[in-house]
Image (spheres, helix red, strand yellow):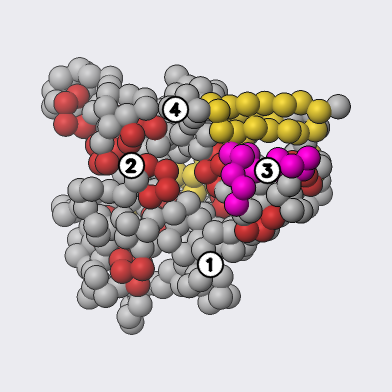
Amino acid sequence: MVTTHRLSSPNGKAFFRWILPILLLVLSALPAGATIKGSCSGCHTMHNSQNGSSMNFDDSATPNAGLLRGTCLGCHAQGGTQALVPIGSDKIPQVMHTDATDLAGGNFAFITGMKGSGASDSKGHNIAELTGMDATITGLPGGIQQSFHEDYIVNTTNLTCAGTNGCHGYRWAGSSFPKGITGAHHANVDGKLAVADRVGNSYRFLNGVKGLEDDDWQYTRSSTDHNEYFGRTTPIKLGCSSGTTACHASDGSGVKSPDGTISQYCATCHGNFHTIQTDRSSGIGPTAASPFIRHPTDLVLPTNGEYSLYTAYNVNVPIARTGSVPDVPSGAVTPGSDAVICLSCHVAHASDYPDMLRWDYAGACNANTVNTDCGCFTCHTAKDGDSLQ
């Protein structure tokens, strides 16, 4: 039995034709983790031709590398009305759509203006093939310096989803799509990812990153229904010189998070925003102690003062667990153990606010004014109008 789906692009042209078996790509729990099962023809085509028609999802006559019927964008950025697109009995998470609900990573549609308050390059990462190149900046915000590896290899004109110039998959020289991500879906392990020694068992295919994946990418979410992120109690010195920690894996798997934290992974491009000062950077400051010159991440929430009041998990201001990856999501926050991370304030792909922020920092965050739309006050409780003062 065959089901046919036709999805439309934002400009109204139908360009995604899916011919899929009902049980395509069912993910089932196996002893080694959850891996893809189902018809190979759902994702692959031998000659990109069937009955005289292209087998590509976008009807293109040009074959794709890896015998694939589509690229990352062809599967995950369809530009339709759903954040989760049905594929047999499973669903494909979308990073560009007009659904009222966004997934945990955010939505590239905010950059183009397809959704939200208007188009702006500053609202997210600009994937050249998806949203166009960034017309405002060319270098990496927070890049340690031009001679530092990632600041000259990756820039706003060549950013991709995966590979050397992307975030997902292996990031080594020459690992462009699909080489950088090849095999990851077949080796996929979901749920609790506490090892992260390869892409397939790393959080959301971010090489070396640990965490607990929510099973619907936070389409439904609450204080006890969310991703769990892994962090450190103190940030590191990231660099290539003596006394620093390198982000290049000794096992030859390319750039990765040295200790498995999501903030360290972001720091491989945006080092000044996340790490302690080195001879190449000014970082957050010379030590992991206040006063900082940039907001710290991978830093444990203090147990004293205003920070001690953040004890109930806020899905709009996520924190990371230190020590180990939890088995299940928790609705509790423990100052002195849990840490602030880059995703406490930002989303990974794009949001409706500048700098991929989770809230309207410039307009809604007014000190000593009660405003539940400002996430800053979740940690900085004494600065809110409804505070200890």
For the stretch drawn in magenta, what is the main secondary structure?
Answer: loop
Q: Between 66 and 266, which is closer to the camera in this rendering?
A: 66
| CA distance separating discs 1 and 4 | 31 Å
| CA distance separating discs 3 and 1 | 27 Å
Choose the circle earlier in sequence order: 1 or 4: 4
Residue 22 on image: x %, y %: 80, 29
| CA distance separating discs 3 and 2 | 33 Å
Q: Between 48 and 250, which is closer to the camera in this rendering?
A: 48
Q: Type of residue at label 4?
A: Pro
In the rendered view, tell whether residue 219 sits above or below residue 338: above
Q: Are marks 2 and 4 in contact (CB under 8 Å)?
A: no
The boundaries of the magenta stretch are 50-62
Q: Nearer the viewer, mark 2 or mark 4?
A: 4
Looking at the image, which residue is at 45% across and 19% down? 100
The residue pinned by badge 4 equals 10
Q: Is residue 174 left or right of residue 112?
A: right
Q: Between 161 and 358, which is closer to the camera in this rendering?
A: 161
The residue pinned by badge 2 equals 124
Choose the circle earlier in sequence order: 3 or 2: 3
**Mark 2 crowdedness (10 Å alpha carbons): few <14, some 14-19, many ≥20:** many
Choose the circle earlier in sequence order: 2 or 4: 4
Q: Are marks 1 and 4 in contact (CB under 8 Å)?
A: no
Residue 191 on image: x %, y %: 65, 42
Q: Is residue 379 magenta?
A: no
In the rendered view, tell whether residue 283 sits above or below residue 228: below
Q: Quadrant of the C terminus?
A: top left
Q: Are marks 3 and 4 in contact (CB under 8 Å)?
A: no
Q: What number is the disc on residue 175?
A: 1
Can the viewer see residue 214?
A: no
The residue pinned by badge 3 equals 54
Q: Are marks 3 and 2 in contact (CB under 8 Å)?
A: no
Q: Type of residue at label 1?
A: Ser
